Structure formats: structure tokens, C-alpha cells
């Protein structure tokens, strides 16, 4: 009997894959700095004992309930000095580097938004809410738009570091370092412009192309119309109903768009299966509530988009 063995012990054998790196380079290197100091086990962090494994101290033993000052001193070198030595070494040579930072480790060195910068972050949040209900946008794009807040935060931090990097590298005084922890309104404005004038318009165009190529639209249309049937208590599907439900149901391909509900026995011809109203009572109530909230959001969204894009 042949037993499946999950490990690949053959590989490319005598004919290895030939990798062609840019410039005919013989080797590709990626430099990564781990920013971990301040994220280790410590009594001050609420852990039962100090770190005993992730260090150069071989054979260290944890002592429950007691701080280990030697271990803490090993980790305290990294964030105040060690990281910045590596940072200067790479940036002075213009060598790209990846930083893996532990959230708890970077928390003592927070970056905060100025009052003016907060204004742009709030506008991004309003834009995300507007996209949730804006007509004509696919569900796939609307789900993607929900990530714009996180995208703005990461891009804003990147812009802030780029613009203030010389100040940190030169190890300015304490007052200057405190100032550098605050993201300016101007940096937030530039980040907002990149998002609204480049990233978001390109994302809209990309998802439009994907929608045209994909076959998910029929499923999305069927699901949307099912909600419309429930929320309005429909018993028949007429041309007028299709017209009122959505512009997507007004074209010549109605049969294809309704295929999902027909296959699911929601409709037969023009008649709606009465059982769906009995089975989905709670969903019908939820649909009515959702649609009312969506209309309110839509009105706010139109206003937000008019303010940003005119």
C-alpha cells in the first residue's frame, strides 16, 4: 500500500532551477531588523517572571515574582542605541531594510497626531463610511474600502518617518525628539492627497475591471435582490419591480442576473415563493433596518464626496 508522504525529498534533483536576478547578481540579500526590546517577558509587563530564553544569557533561569535586572539591561540596549546604530549604518549606505517591530516594544516610543492631522484622519473615516453605501460600487470594492483607514495610518507613518528621518539619525536633543513624535498637519494633508488623488481612484478603476471580468456579479445581484424582495414583502417580480430595485436589473441580461434566485427556488417565472417570507421573517426586519440606515448614510456620503471631489 502506498502511503502519502507530505515532505518533498526530491526537489529539482540534478537540474536545479536557474534564478536570474537583476543585473545578473549571484545572490539576493534581504536585511531585516527585529525591534523586540521592550516586548520580552518582564515583571513590569505583568508576566510571572523575567525573560529566560530570548537572550544571549545561556542557562538563565526565571525566578517567579522577581525582576531580573541583568536580563532587563540586555534588552534595554536595543531601542535606545542598538536599533539606531543599525539604522544609521543602513541609511548612510542607502541600503533598504525591513523592520519587524513588536507592538509592545514600540509602544514606549509613540507617534501621535497633531490636532490638524486628526482632521484628515477623520475625513478618511467619513470617506470609508460613504463608500459603504455609494451606488454602483461592487461589494468587493466596498470591502476593500473598509481598509482605507489602516492604509492611511501606515502611509502617514511612512511619510512622517521619511520627512523627519534626518532629525532622528542625527540624534537631536530631547526637545527636538519629542517634537518629532508628533505628525504635522502638512504631512497628513500630503498623505490624504496621495490617498484621494491616486490610490483610491486607481482602486476604483481596478475593481471595475475585475467586476467586468468576474462572474461574481450575478451572485451579488441575486443576493441584493433577495434582500429587496424580503424588505418590500414582494409576491411578484415585474418589470416595474426590477426597475425600482436597482439599475443593474434594468438591462437585457435580466435572465442571467435572476438565475441564482430561480435556482434557489425563490422565484418561479414572475411569482415569488411565499415560503421565503415565512422562513426569513427576522432577515426581512434586518433588511428593512439596514436599508433605512443605508439611505441615511448615503445622504451623508454624497455630501462627503461632494466636499472632497467636488
Image: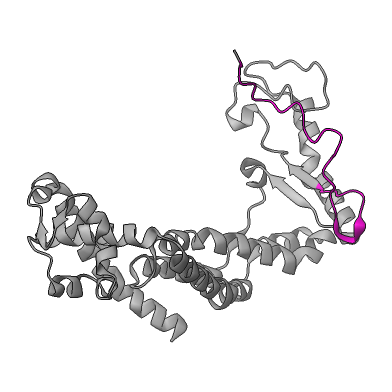
245 relative position to 28: left or right: left
Q: Is residue 28 magenta?
A: yes
Q: Is 166 rendered above or below residue 226?
A: below
**In the image, what residue occupies the spot 42% across and 82% down?**
307
Quadrant holding the C terminus: bottom left
- Front residue (pair 55, 6): 6
Q: Position of residue 208 (x, y in %)?
A: 46, 71
Count of marks, rendered view: 0
Q: Main secondary structure of the magenta part?
A: loop
| Residue at the limit of the structure toward the top, as seen here | 1
- Quadrant containing the N terminus is top right
Is 110 within the magenta? no
Q: Residue furthest front?
A: 1
The image's colouring method is one colour
Q: Where is 179 relative to 13, above or below?
A: below
Specify whether 145 is left or right of 224.
right
Residue 217, quarter of picture: bottom left
- In the foreground, 86 or 130: 130
Identified at 71% across, 63% down, the residue is: 161
Q: Residue at x 82, y 48 (%)?
A: 31
Q: Give whichever of 110, 153 is nearer the camera.
A: 153
Image position, residue 222 (x, y; %): 27, 59
**Residue 183, how many percent across, how many down?**
63, 66
Left or right relative to 2: residue 229: left
Residue 254, image quadrant? bottom left
The part of the chain drawn in magenta is: 2-31
Asked if 201 appears above or below 80 in the picture, the reply is: below
Residue 216 at x, y percent in the picture:
39, 58
Amino acid at each position: 500500500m502506498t502511503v502519502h508522504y507530505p515532505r518533498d525529498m526530491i526537489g529539482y534533483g540534478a537540474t536545479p532551477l536557474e534564478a536570474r536576478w537583476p543585473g545578473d547578481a549571484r545572490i539576493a540579500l534581504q536585511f531585516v531588523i527585529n525591534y523586540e526590546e521592550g516586548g520580552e517577558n518582564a515583571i513590569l509587563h505583568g508576566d510571572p517572571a523575567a525573560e529566560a530564553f530570548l537572550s544571549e544569557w545561556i542557562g538563565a533561569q526565571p525566578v517567579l515574582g522577581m525582576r531580573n535586572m541583568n536580563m532587563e539591561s540586555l534588552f534595554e540596549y536595543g531601542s535606545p542605541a542598538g536599533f539606531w546604530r543599525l539604522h544609521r549604518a543602513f541609511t548612510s549606505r542607502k541600503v533598504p531594510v525591513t523592520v519587524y517591530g513588536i507592538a509592545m516594544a514600540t509602544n514606549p516610543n509613540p507617534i501621535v497626531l497633531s490636532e490638524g492631522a486628526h482632521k484628515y484622519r477623520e475625513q478618511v473615516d467619513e470617506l470609508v463610511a460613504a463608500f459603504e453605501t455609494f451606488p454602483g460600487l461592487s461589494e468587493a470594492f466596498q470591502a476593500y474600502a473598509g481598509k482605507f483607514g489602516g492604509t492611511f495610518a501606515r502611509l502617514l507613518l511612512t511619510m512622517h518617518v521619511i520627512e523627519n528621518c534626518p532629525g532622528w539619525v542625527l540624534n537631536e536633543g530631547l526637545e527636538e525628539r519629542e517634537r518629532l513624535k508628533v505628525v504635522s498637519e502638512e504631512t497628513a494633508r500630503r498623505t490624504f492627497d496621495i490617498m484621494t488623488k491616486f490610490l483610491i481612484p486607481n482602486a476604483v478603476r481596478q475593481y471595475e475591471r475585475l467586476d467586468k471580468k468576474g462572474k461574481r456579479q450575478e451572485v451579488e445581484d441575486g443576493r441584493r435582490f433577495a434582500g429587496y424582495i424580503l424588505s418590500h414583502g414582494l409576491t411578484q417580480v415585474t418589470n416595474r419591480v426590477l426597475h425600482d430595485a436597482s439599475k443593474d436589473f434594468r438591462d437585457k441580461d435580466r435572465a442571467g442576473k435572476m438565475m441564482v434566485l430561480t435556482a434557489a427556488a425563490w422565484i418561479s417565472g414572475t411569482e415569488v415563493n411565499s415560503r421565503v417570507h415565512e422562513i426569513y421573517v427576522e432577515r426581512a426586519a434586518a433588511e428593512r433596518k439596514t436599508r433605512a440606515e443605508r439611505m441615511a448614510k448615503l445622504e451623508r456620503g454624497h455630501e462627503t464626496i461632494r466636499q472632497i471631489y467636488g
